[in-house]
Amino acid sequence: MTNVRITPLTPVIGGEIEGIDLATPISDAEASFIRQALLDHHVVFFRNQDLNHDQHKAVGNLFGELVKVPFVESVPFHPEIFEIIKLPEECDVYNFGGNWHTDMTYMQEPALVSTLYGAEVPASGGDTMFASLEDAYSGLSSGMQQLLEGLTGVHTADRSYGRAGKFARDTIADEGMNVRPSEDAAKQIEHPVVRTHPETGRKALYVNPNFTFHFKDMSEDESKPLLDFLFKHITRDEFVCRFRWTSGSVVIWDNRCTMHRALNDYDGHRRVMRRVTVGGDQPRLI
Ligand SMILES: O=C(O)CCC(=O)C(=O)O
Ligand SMILES: [Fe+2]
């Protein structure tokens, strides 16, 4: 553990960990270091890793049990892994994860942690952005914080994976990855607009433009101005970081306090990422 260190990417979000080889069995001391780094920095990055499927799953298991992500096809024999692929010929189309979101908030128990392995990355472009929902919450006035604590958000995957959602159209980069629209996506799930992180006790603003479509007991039109303000607020420069992938990078993010977005500025190039997802518990305001 002598050479293990973390370098913050910004003062509020992101940290790069050096000195750990994720392909070898991860020691208890290394595991505690990574878990604490994730609580402190919300998203952590590793470079030059070489992971097979089992080693990648072992990284996910540092945080809990793995889940299969709905609506996307897994790799053969590993239901807990799927690939995010954009092919060189998929130009001028929406990319998977291309809009700000937190993973799986369309479920009662959304993802706790997601880990992404950069298998093939373009020479430039295809960065991923992350935003701190905790710092965004602390950056609001006490009046706005109080108002939001009384609200519930209604989340659904319908606009992404529903029968008439984005992925049911052909203006999407999903040739290589097989996304499966379904009527199950229409389900509406409620989460508090402000949630407490069960491990740190910090509050986070738990809404995202992909899946939160209105406040409970309010119409979409009524909800829109406040939601739009919140989405703009969360993505202010001071709450975000941007990760530039190199092949073999591993990124681990805490879905309880972040949202993220995959940039789509590399048309004509191939990008392949492998995702392992850890199951979470029901978000609560404590
Ligand atoms: O491709 C990326 O950079 C991120 C995609 C995404 O949203 C995810 O893996 O959850
Ligand atoms: Fe995502």
Image (tube, grey):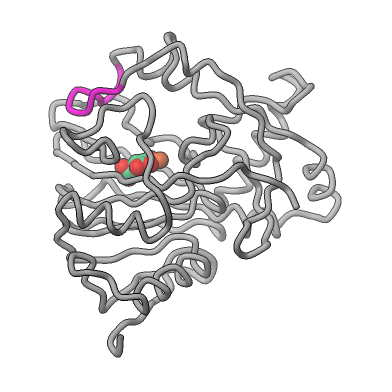
Q: Is residue 181 magenta?
A: no
Q: Which residues are magenta?
A: 171-179
Which residue is located at x 54 percent, y 35 percent? 105
Q: Main secondary structure of the magenta part?
A: loop
- 27 to 225, vertically: above or below: below
Is 69 left or right of 54, judged from the image as shown? right
Q: Position of residue 184 (x, y in %)?
A: 47, 16
Q: Quadrant of ligand 2?
A: top left
Between 204 and 94, the residue placed more toward the observer is: 204
- 104 to 197, vertically: above or below: above
Is 23 left or right of 281, judged from the image as shown? left
Is 119 left or right of 32, judged from the image as shown? left
- 185 to 83, vertically: above or below: above
- 97 to 179, vertically: above or below: below
Q: Position of residue 213 (x, y in %)?
A: 62, 25
Q: Quadrant of residue 3?
A: bottom left
Res 262 visible? no
Q: Is residue 175 magenta?
A: yes
Between 117 and 199, the residue placed more toward the observer is: 199
Which residue is located at x 55 percent, y 50 percent? 256
